[in-house]
Image (cartoon, rainbow, N blue to C red):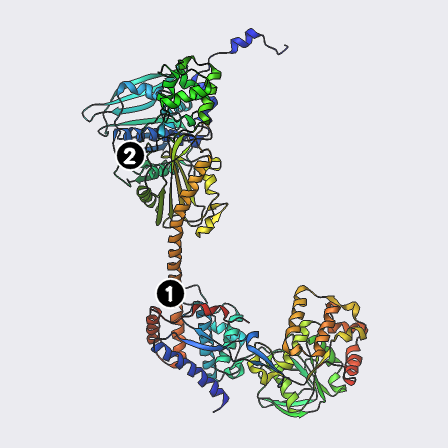
Amino acid sequence: MSEKNSAKSNIEKMGHGLLKEIREGKNPSVDVPIRALSNIKFNPTTRMIEMGLNKAKRFFFNVAHVRSFVQTMEAAATARELIEMDKHLSLRQVFYRMKRTIPGTEMNIVDEQEESNKAIEDLELIVDSPREKLHINANKNGSVAGKVIIEDHGDTIDWSKLGSGGWSIPSNVEDIKFKKVNAKFIIYMEKAAEWESMHEHRVWEKQDCVIMASQGQATRGVRRLLQRLSLEFNLPVYILVDGDPWGMYIYSVLKYGSISLAHMSESLTIPNAKMLGMTADDVTKYNLKRHIIKFKDIDKSRLKQLKGYDWFKSKEWQTELGKWEKLGGKVELAALTANGISFMAEKYLPDKIKNKDWLD
Amino acid sequence: MDGFKTAEQMAAEQREISVAEFFEKNRHLLGFDNPSKSVLTVVKEAIDNSLDACEEAGILPEITIKIRQLETDDRFKISVQDNGPGMPAKQIPMAFGKLLYGSKFYKMRQSRGQQGIGISAALLYSQLTTGKPATIRSRTDAKHKIVEFQLRMNTAKNEPTVVKEGEYEGSFPDTGVYVEMELEGKYRKGRQSVDEFIKQTAVANPVAKIVYYAPDGEKVTYSRATDKLPKKAKSILPHPHGVELGVFERMSKNTKSRTVTAFLSNDFSRVSSQSAREFCKLSKVSPDTDPKKLEPHDIEKLWRTIQAAKIMKPPLDCLSPIGEDVLEKAIKKDLNAEFVAAITRPPEVYRGNPFGIEVCIGYGGGLPLNEAGEMIRIANRVPLLYEPSSCAIMKAMKTIDWGHYKLQHENKLPFGPIVVLVHLYSTWIPYTSESKEAVDAYPEILKEIRLALQDCLRKIGKYLAGQRRRQMESKRQSLFEKYIPEFAYTMEKLTGEKKEKIETDLKKLLHKEGLKVEEDVGKEQRKE
């Protein structure tokens, strides 16, 4: 049985389970694994954030549950239809498909995309299938360049011959075949701006590497592509993020997984990713102290939160976070430009890799 | 011209002030301070007379009030017809055409009469603003003819002038009085309007049937909430602790008693001749002195001795409350409240005066949702519409923690579909001023109002808690009713089962007792 069919049959199984409860005069319910810090664990052996076993029962006849319950059912019906028709929709499109006014009321099934997104995430957990298998595409947002040739739905694509934009990473990378990979490592950047500048400097050509970027938190497609390249071709992944708690968290999500997608850590995490920069030591070493932007209260409390996460408990990271607390502000990657237009591509990056100047 | 006057000139300017001048200077004390209040005052004086007369004669009152706006915008014709005992023809000119006629002195009794200055002031106001005479009709026996007077007041002499006297041939109740006047005024809606006054009068006098034709053509009928006439309030002698020095002195001059002992024991309640002699001894006044011949300093000494002495409370059975049942019925009927609760507190005493408090609270039903609650202040069955902020009733209300009883509130007063009526009944209502719009805040009175409000609010609180539960339940039901078709529709898509069948099954489940719902578990859902 193919995976697609297992997603469909799991959805149907859920439906029949509910039907049985209704017939037996029970309050229809589904079990949803809890996606919260209280129900995830950092497994030091696998070095992954893993989902715990706690499940919440969600009932139809419950004032607090009914709305999200019906949203989840609506998401299930949509996914089943998509699988059957072998078509895909984006999260945004599914939102519009679910957004309907209940006849005779002023209530919508969903009002915000956030609600339909959560319904889909719940459905993934209930039927134990990632959204790609539910034919719902994650947002597509990412670029890649390098001496790599792939095959995607019958087309052969050379990542080194795609002009200034590079290859745009789709939301689902499961079916991509790597034909030729000529790289020694991968650099992942938090921001598209840095990627464009690296691409312009043809860093991937000069350093024999792949450069990849998303915007902000990496999308699932980007994470999966990074993981596949790294695992299938044994390539180290170097991560460049802004020097602030949010950047450090992006790094940790890539490496260990996230709280809300803890159930998918296995197919998304990159345990051998290294944090190349911006480190607290870089600030001194590269004379960036004058570019410190003072932390706001929210930054400070996020930094404190990070310190408490199990996957930041290593001595190395506690020291690093402590140093940032002392610096009292953030430093963006873009600040490196203060040392020269090509400073990042031609000096900072090669030096750091050569000296193994990173955090693990 | 030096601008100074001689003593002769000044004396020449001094003359007797006419009644009309007195009225003009004191109209605010008499309830005629502005045009809209004047309309109200005329109606109020006429209704007071009618209700008093009916009660006195043991007749169930039926009163018809008509207010018509005349062509001139600020002119109104007001008429009030009652079915009271009527008034003998010879008494009519004096009763309507002379100020301060037949006012009640030293008679301590719970009565409306203490209100206002009387119908003759209304007549005077009408005459001063329009120059027209008032029309009075009366019949004292069904077999008699109806007499009709057109009356004016001689303002220089404070004497009535009969413009015309005759018979009236139109329809008329078996007995009763009809009063008609034209006056300058203004008709306004709202909390201090004549409409509101009539409504509150109907509530405070549930034994009366009142029909009201408003200037805008609307006809409102307030039916009776009871057929039982209120218990007659008894007259009592003034209690010595409720009498001020000036009044005490005047009483000593007007008494029929020949000795101080007799004066004290005959003209006051709760003073025995033994204690009267005791007071004389303590004040060093001979008990056999003629009270009319007492020296001012002796009078004061005597009065001070009495004020300091312990004297038994006045008799309390002289009062006549409206009654809890009747109040509840009236508020339910006239204000369209869904739930009502009333409390009549047993009488208490302030400064020697017996008084009692009644509170009735109505909630929900047709009461307006998004407005401040309605506060009805009643003193001896007469509504008080003006000067709320200086009134003891409002002051007491503002000390109540409305939130504690699960009521919405704003500026320390309840908000939303609620009406709070407070009735103060007493042989002597302590008004803050001559205009008689607000009650003085004696601590005893404040305390009783608070206690009555709290008693009543406890009942309302219980009702509201129950109502909230019922509302929650029905809200809950309707929520699921909305979601059931949606759920059934997706279930059909997921399982192929007919959605109609699923809907029926779900609806059965909705009404199933003891369905495991675990509502409390809901809190942690979808929290990240």
Question: Disc 2: which chain?
Answer: B
Residue B220 location (% of width, % of height): 32, 40
Mark pair 1, 2: CA separation: 50 Å
Residue located at (46% from left, 51% from top): B404
When asked about the image quadrant of residue B269, the answer is: top left
Residue A203 location (% of width, % of height): 75, 83
In the rendered view, does B435 fall on the left or right side of A224? left
Residue B20 location (% of width, % of height): 43, 19
Residue neighbourhood size for the residue with mark 2, other residues' Cα within 10 Å, grouped as few (<14), some (14–19), many (≥20): few
Which residue matches tag 2?
Answer: B231
When asked about the image quadrant of residue B378, the answer is: top left
Question: Does label 1 or label 2 sit earlier along the sequence?
Answer: 2
What amino acid is at disc 1?
Gln
Which residue matches tag 1?
Answer: B477
Q: SS for tag 1?
A: helix
Residue B438 location (% of width, % of height): 45, 33
